Image (cartoon, helix red, strand yellow):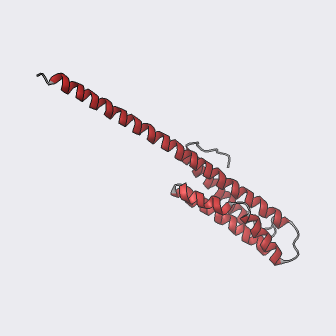
Amino acid sequence: MDWMPLLSTLAGAVIGIAATVIADRNRWKREEARHALEVRREVYTEFVSALKTAGEEMRAVALGDHMSESARDAAVREAVRGTGIYTASERLWLVGPSQVVAAGNEAFHSLRAIRDAYARGVAVDSAEAAPLIARRRAAMAEMRRLMREDLGIGSLDIE
């Protein structure tokens, strides 16, 4: 019996199956990478939006009239808490690469510094608030730059 045709057929089948498995694995990896990118895009958008909303909410509270220092403090803190920033921050910590998480953490802490100043009674447009606001703007710009880089979007060159 001639084994060559049988071995050739078997070798062809093994090569075909191996090629299919490799192609399927590569396709799965691409889909997983695409999905991970989409999850990061969603998390980044949620976090940046929460930071912006928190900033606007606490600014609005700080511009308002308050009967007492404790009422102002409570109102500013509640304005931030109500934006979902803490949940968004945790999501960022779970899925973001370390450089984005570090930049996001800096932006978050710069927002908290402004929150604490407004809670103490610092006026929104005061000289005391100006460096805090500048720090927050710089932190937000760096965070956005790193997020865009991670998403493969490229820089805006406008911040």
Does any portion of residue 128 appear in the rendered image? no
* 20 sits left or right of 135 in the view: left
Residue at 82% of width from left, 75% of height from top?
71
Q: Residue at x 82, y 73 (%)?
A: 72
Q: Is residue 123 left or right of residue 104?
A: right
* Nearest the eye: 46 or 124: 46
Q: On the image, which quarter does residue 123 sit in?
A: bottom right
Residue 136: x %, y % from top left: 68, 61
Displayed quadrant of residue 102: bottom right
- Rendering coords of residue 91 (x, y %): 59, 58
| Residue 133 visible in this rendered orientation of the protein | yes
Quadrant in the rendering for residue 79: bottom right
Image coordinates of residue 41 in percent, x first then y, are: 60, 47
In the rendered view, does 74 fall on the left or right side of 26? right
Considering only vertical position in the picture, is 129 above or below 30? below
Work out which residue is located at the far left of the displayed protein and give it.
1
- The quadrant of the image that shows the N terminus is top left
